[in-house]
Image (spheres, rainbow, N blue to C red):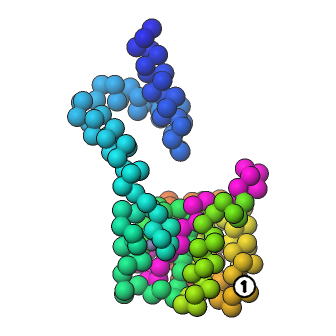
Amino acid sequence: MADADAITELVNQLTRLPGVGEKTATRLAFFLVEAPPDLSRALGEAILSAPGRIRRCRDCGTLTERDPCRICANPSRDGGTVCVVEATPDIAAVERTAEFGGVYHVLHGLIRPLDGVGPDDLNLASLLRRVSSGVVREVIVATNPSVEGEATAMYIRGLLGPQGVRVSRIASGLPVGGELEYADRATLGRAIAARVVL
Ligand SMILES: [Zn+2]
């Protein structure tokens, strides 16, 4: 049963990835064991080498090979408007809307009290530092319209309110409980354009 064990082990490891259930993992595992060796080798090498090449941007916290990242280093971006997102892929989602010319700040999570994730676990200290520098005029909180996304937005308003900066939230139009990363371009673009002051 050595062969079955190898497949089971591959399935077990794949189900540790976010968004991969047992069904998908099983399909991928059977694909991988019969895939051309160069595919498995290239995939394995990319998985192993990416973490060593990727770091967090010192300004916005996004995962990047360049520090500061391409957006923070771009002088034509408006450093006075900061869009706060949960995770790095959300930046690509907002960029696709072409509604936003400012810079970003990546929290690397949301406040989830039930999972023991509090404000100190998020990339918030550097957001407060950025705002304290006086360059920032507006912070747009673009977290998912979920309970955790709303709670995190409210926390940020409380944190930054005393700094005298305008804190806004992307407007509804996004499905409640939905995820920014998968929102269609027009809906997310409208949500940014019609953001509301918190
Ligand atoms: Zn950056």
In the picture shown, does residue 117 fall above or below 188? above
* Residue bearing the label numbered 1: 161
Residues shaded magenta: 96-117
Give the structural element (helix, strand or loop) at label 1.
helix
Residue 196 picture quarter: bottom right
Pick whichever, 134 or 41, lies toward us.
Answer: 134
Q: Can residue 171 be seen in this view?
A: no
Query: x, y (%) of residue 86?
Result: 57, 64
Residue type at mark 1?
A: Gly
> Where 12 falls versus 134 (above or below)?
above
Residue 102 in percent (x, y) is at 47, 83
Q: Which image quarter: residue 71?
A: bottom left
Tell me the residue at 73%/73% (across/down). Answer: 154
Q: Position of residue 55 (x, y in %)?
A: 43, 60
| Residue 102 is covered by the magenta coloring | yes
**Which image quadrant shows ligand 1?**
bottom left
Quarter of the C terminus within the rendering = bottom right
Q: In this view, does 46 lie to the left or right of 110?
A: left
Residue at horizontal 72 percent and vertical 85 percent from the top: 161
Observer-nearest of 195 and 85: 85
In the rendering, at what x and y percent does residue 62 appear? 47, 66
Tell me, yes or no, if residue 131 can be seen here: yes
Residue count near mark 1 (Cα–Cα under 10 Å), binned few <14, some 14–19, many ≥20: few
Residue depicted at 63% across the width and 70% down the height: 124
**Above/below status of 55 relative to 105:** above
How many marks the image carries: the answer is 1
Label 1 CB less than 8 angstroms from ligand 1: no
From the image, which quarter does the N terminus lie in?
A: top left
Looking at the image, which is closer to me, 157 or 63? Answer: 63
Looking at the picture, tell me which residue is in the foreground, 105 or 52. Answer: 52
- In reply to whether residue 78 is colored magenta, the answer given is no
Q: Residue furthest top?
A: 1
